[in-house]
Image: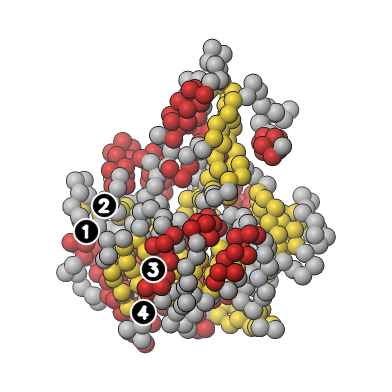
Amino acid sequence: MIYREYCTIDEENGKPGKIEFHYPENFNFAYDVVDRIAKSDPEKKALVWCNTEGDERILSFSDISRMSIRYAHVLLDNGIARGDRVIVALRRHYQYWPLAVALHRIGAVMIPVTHMLTSSDYAYRLKTSEAKAAIVTPLGSTAENILSAVRSAGLATQLWTIERDIEGYRNFSKEEKDKSEELERIETKATDPMLIYFTSGTTGYPKGVVHDFTYPLAHIVTAACWQGAEDNGLHFTVAETGWAKASWGKIYGQWLAGSAVMAYDFDNFDPGQLVSVINRYGVTSFCAPPTVYRYLVKKGIEAMPTLRHASTAGEYLNPEIFQRFKEKTGLDLHEGYGQTETVLIAGNLKGVPAVDGSMGIPSPLYDVRIIDSDGCEVKRGERGEIAILPRDGKKPLGIFSGYLGNDNLYKEVWRDGVYHTGDSASMDENGYLWFMGRFDDIIKSGGFRIGPGEIEDILITHPAVLECSVIGIPDPLRGQAVKAIVHPKPGFEPTKELGKEIKDYCNSRLAEYKWIRKLSFTEGFPKTISGKIIKTELRKAESL
């Protein structure tokens, strides 16, 4: 396991304890992990990929290394260099993995995005990031939406797709075929920006979260200590590559731990197909949001004899699901907690009894405290904010290095020398954390983080809407569903027909995972003295 060359993890009574990192100033995942494994064990399995059409690719580290060098030459030949930003929307296509390594290899900044976005979503990300290129899937409407965004914004973004020829795009797959598989190391620094994810905020547009080249190392704890990834194992995280969960479970920590990654390229979720993939390829560890486990339990869990570890994160897990999964498989569900801005903050870790409903114990990476509004640590069992304190006066590994173009917001979450997560929890006498909600208004639905402001910005443009507010409400399958509450303008009757019209208007302009599932009308909103709508009162009314 190559991660032992870059860190030391002491075990305390069988559980991960103190962790110390030692890596060069020019650490780069492409050269120092992928290439090194490819050289020492060229046939070691890196990626097992299949799709719903029956296609299959099994790639070794040597394959990934050579492909990534060819990909790097395409990028370099077209002026993409260290520090340049490149948007990647490749769903679960196997080309994502060598492309990610290629971008790291040349020091470019990868910006993964989901294929589920609208043209306006892409336009915002392209303009905000000043992306020099975009490499996208040929399937669905993604290429069309991105091309529309580039043209409407008057951008000069270079556009590539893969495998197919599409008008307005160059074919990356054709261009990489005859490229050299030799390339001298391009020097980068561990502190260089490597990755940007756009994550939802409570108001306004998504924020660009910047991670540097040390980020993969911090995911050693995510993979080896929480997800159960093991040397020569096969780890399967369900996430699509446009989300930060892909970095958590589909590449960095898993390869550092010596585990191959399972990738199943599908459009529509089918629990039976997932189980079939797990059994066909011999998956040893599995990670998915609670929504997936709910469907598995609801549909009836088949035997999965090779599976040795199961983990989950992203939203509340019903204790009944936890218990029924264990009854059927004999496996505990190891819950975990973290953010796009971090790696794993807490989890039911290796060597620690999994406690139903708890996020687990703090990661050995972080000094986690539960604090009050004055920054003081609260008593055990009391609610407070989850905060991370620096160790030895340094920012811990794995915590983001900035918000793209928003230094003030970065300073806000790092105020008083402490990283404020914005999440509330309590810590019990045994050191386990119990999630108690967001202090802000982020909605977590089906494993997705949704900023209500993005939806409200569209709602308010409907001619019948005077005021509006969006909240998350309990949903048995999604965890939370998006609900819109609308105060109609004078002259508009709050009818069922008007409600449907407003929903359809908004949903046609939103990515599907953000769709409004329920809408109600009100004659007025509870507000603060300054006129801000009090969402906590709206959520409280929903629970009555």
Q: How many marks?
A: 4
Residue 138: which numbered mark, if any?
A: 2
Residue 443 position by quadrant: top right
What amino acid type is highlighted by mark number 4?
Lys
Image coordinates for residue 205, horizontal then vertical, percent: 50, 41
Circle 2: is it few (<14), some (14-19), or many (20+) Cα within 10 Å?
Answer: many
Q: CA distance from mark 3 to mark 4?
A: 17 Å
- What residue is shown with label 3? 277
Q: What amino acid is found at the position of numbered circle 3 in the picture? A: Val
State which quadrant residue 451 falls in: top right
Q: CA distance from mark 1 to mark 4?
A: 24 Å
Residue type marked 1: Glu
The residue wearing badge 1 is 163
Q: Residue at x 40, y 52 (%)?
A: 113
Sequence-earlier tag: 1 or 2: 2
What residue appears at the point 21 percent right and 65 percent down from the top-left corner? 176
State the CA–CA distance, disc 1 to disc 2.
8 Å
Residue 129 picture location, percent across and down: 41, 49
Do tag 1 and tag 2 residues touch (Cβ < 8 Å)?
Answer: yes
* Among numbered discs 3 and 4, the one appearing first in the sequence: 4
**Image coordinates for residue 310, horizontal then vertical, percent:** 54, 70
The residue identified by callout 4 is 45
